[in-house]
Image (cartoon, grey):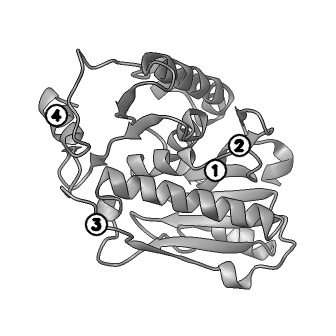
Amino acid sequence: PTSLQVAQSLAKIHSRLDQQLNIVADNDEMVRQASLDSREKFLPRLIEKTAETIRMQAGGYKQRAALFAFGLMPSLIALGAKLGNKNEIIPMLRYRDGGQWTWPSDIPIGRTYEITGLEGLADTESEIALIVALTADPEPPNNLARDLLETKGIRYIKVLASAEHMGNAAIAHPTDGKQFSTEIQSLLHRLSDKHGVKLIHVLPCASNAACVFFGQAYYRHHPELLVYDFTPGGMKPQILIRNDGESCHLSAPSRALLS
């Protein structure tokens, strides 16, 4: 982001830049050109180290920090999960419509999405799929993962933006992002406590900020998250997020989960 874009983004949370912009990671050429297979192996550790650096530069949990994070959706969700919600680290939006870092609304606009599918869940659903459709809602055959999960009998829940707000503006203000994170955390609690869910297949289609906000909702005792992304062969699992009750762990998906 440019200095002007940083200032415009921070203005929405009534803040200004203290000293200078800290560059945590810019993903060198080796990372960007890595094959999907090799990236799966080292990306979890890279995200963990990046999260550690962000927390350190934010002074532990004592300072408010704006996070300009851009990358693959599973990576951003995993980064948010590692950062957690016990801090004042606030993701900023890379607004595609304007081609810059900015929030499209000066004030919170409230809930722009609906959560459907909960009414059909049983008390013992070991696995479910969670479709997060905020920037688009890809249907089969474009979303082959959802088609495959349905053939395996896995039920799905959908977080769907309204037609009016579908796009990067579905989460249009940082306050709306925090509310989104709170609602996702409540949803994950419910899936674990009420429905006995152990594994959630997350199929996201959301902005960079929404992905980090989603990850920040992840908390101890929540089900494991198997996060998918679009690849040349369709949507496939890219990263596994789990919590052992004390800390969050990232890893490449195991073959057992992919079968």
Give the CA separation, mark 1 to mark 4: 32 Å
Residue located beneath label 3 in the image: 109
Q: Secondary structure at mark 2?
A: strand
Eye-nearest disc, 2 or 3? 3
Which residue type carries mark 3?
Ile
Q: Is residue 90 left or right of residue 39?
A: left
Instruction: Look at the numbered discs 2 and 4 and tell me whether their residues touch, using CB distance below 8 Å.
Output: no
**Foreground of the two, 75 or 175:** 175
Label 1: few (<14), some or many (≥20) within 10 Å?
Answer: many
- Name the residue at 50% across, 23% down: 55
Which residue type carries mark 4?
Ala
Q: Secondary structure at mark 1?
A: strand
Residue 109 visible, this angle? yes
Residue located beneath label 4 in the image: 7
Q: Is residue 65 left or right of residue 87?
A: left
Which residue type carries mark 2?
Leu
Q: Earlier in the sequence, mark 4 or mark 3?
A: 4
